[in-house]
Image (spheres, rainbow, N blue to C red):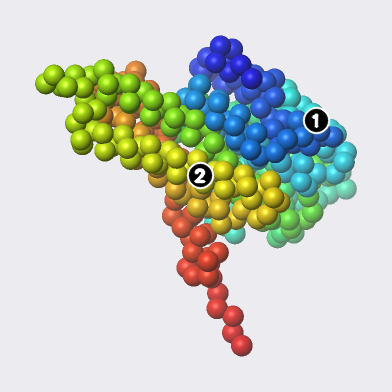
Amino acid sequence: MNFATQLPKSGNRLASKSRLQFCGQQGLFKQAVPKELGGLGNGFQELVEAHLKLGKVCQDTGLILSINAHIWGSIFPLMLYGTEKQKNTWLPALISGEMIGGHAITEPQAGSDISLLQATATVTEEGFVLNGHKRFITNTPIADVLVIYAQLDSKLSAFLVCSDDIGADFKDSPEVVGCKTATMGDVHLTNCHIPLNRQLGKTGAGNMMIQNALELERAFIFAGIIGIMQWQLAEVIQYSRQRMIQGEHLGANQAISHKIADMKCRLDTCLLWVNECVRLKDAEKRISLASAQTKLIASEAFLQSSLDAVHILGAKGLMQENKMLELVQDAMASRLFSGSSEMQKNIIAALIGTGTGFKTRKN
């Protein structure tokens, strides 16, 4: 995969889509996908290595966010829950990058708490009619299809909705700061009609599908970001060697060298956690706890290392055109996407038998 010399430059919505399509053409969406479904038939270790390489080359957190929304939000749900006909219809174009996908969970009144989701689906003789409002959905303005979660007979279920379906409006607002190359927006569903063959998975399987998609996203979205952190560390080390203060290079200052040492430790810790998720997935074991731990540790580490990098660069790090300043905003966003740091702590506490998600069994 030759990301370095060929990746299209970021810019408008069209450029964002072309960058995702390019990644598909390079085979990035084939990682950890069985050969019989059009993938490479390899494992999650190869997926992580490919994402690391991309992050180190492009340093584009928004692109990495978009890629992960596409993979875990549309490709893997279709792989895991789609009928044979749905897989044959949708997967080839999604895996090749010809079509761009994602998933729509969040609503204006419902962020991390999916029990508050209010979008609805009603069954008719011709198909389903969807109504609702989704917010802050990655890839929405450039997506060809989204896996949208809605209540069907008061049971959370999943549906494949295309951008050109009547009653579906994929918008490019509101704009947010951070990960700016990841196009994001609202989805308005107003009597949106889709055929019966667009339901994905069984009625009521929405909770399980969302949990599975988010676990995978939390586990592996930081593979690409760790690549960025590797670039970030290399840049800071180089600067500390070149910058001279009172006849000594900046890195000779213990306060600076300690910050760089901390950045290195955070980087390697993040990589260890992602590789633990790889080990579990390739062994076909659950990653519920490990993925929440990975997301929590990695997002906090990315933010602190980004702040340290700007601090080490001094005023240069505050210049508008400096990549390090942009990464601080991206790192702030990383504490929120795929579930906030506080939500990860809730999940961890519940899974180890404490916290608000744990209920004592009564005899």
The dot on residue 168 is none
Q: Is residue 268 left or right of residue 139?
A: left
Mark 2 crowd level (few <14, some 14–19, many ≥20, 10 Å Cα)? few
Quarter-of-image position of residue 92: top right
Which residue in the rendered view is the most extreme toward the bottom?
363
Q: Residue at x 76, y 41 (%)?
A: 78
Q: Nearer the viewer, residue 76 or 180?
A: 76
The dot on residue 38 is 1
Q: Nearer the viewer, residue 25 or 190?
A: 25
Answer whether residue 123 is visible to the viewer in this image.
yes
Measured along the vertical axis of the image, is residue 21 above or below residue 268? above
Answer whether residue 307 is visible to the viewer in this image.
no
The dot on residue 272 is 2
Does label 1 or label 2 sit earlier along the sequence? 1
Quarter-of-image position of residue 139: top right
x and y percentages locating residue 358 in the rendered image: 54, 70
